[in-house]
Image (cartoon, rainbow, N blue to C red):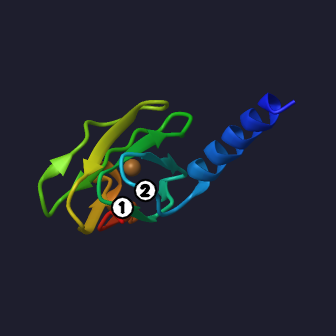
Amino acid sequence: MRYPRLILGAATLATLLAGGAALAGDSVVEVEMLDYEYHPTELEVEAGTTVRWVNAETRTSHDIYFADEDIGSPRLFPEESWERTFEEPGTYPYHCRPHENRDMQGVVTVVPAE
Ligand SMILES: [Cu+2]
């Protein structure tokens, strides 16, 4: 009866990864766009991590724009997503161009991989 225990362990690990704030490199972390906000607003990841922004609204579109670097997503409609992989440690502020006036913004902090 070892096998079921292994499966349970893997599922638990997946749950932890999905909810974690700082994660190992080469993983994917999701940021939800809902109610004109990014969730989480502030995210810390290790270098090499891919961040995936997912539009969880029912009808509002958003985008992700890093003004300092002039890097941005297309406008994302509900259920659409966009990814960016962060290789270099640093602070990456971003905002939503259509909702700049609603103060819709977030920041990704990238720390060196352990
Ligand atoms: Cu927006």
Count all numbered tags in the image, as a single digit: 2
Residue under the image location 56 percent in, 58 percent down? 20
| Percent x, y of residue 27 | 42, 46
Residue under the image location 30 percent in, 37 percent down? 75
In the picture of the structure, the residue carrying the numbered disc 2 is 24
Q: Is residue 4 above or below residue 69?
A: above
Q: Is residue 68 left or right of residue 14?
A: left
Q: Secondary structure at mark 1?
A: strand
Tag 1 and tag 2, C-beta contact below 8 Å: yes
Q: As rendered, which of 62 and 29 lies closer to the eye?
A: 29
Q: CA distance from mark 1 to mark 2?
A: 6 Å
Indicate the amino acid at tag 1.
Glu
Indicate the amino acid at tag 2.
Ala
Q: Is residue 36 left or right of residue 10?
A: left
| Percent x, y of residue 38 | 46, 56
Residue under the image location 26 percent in, 65 percent down? 92
Rendered-image quadrant of the C terminus: bottom left
* Numbered circle sitting on residue 46: 1
| Percent x, y of residue 2 | 81, 33
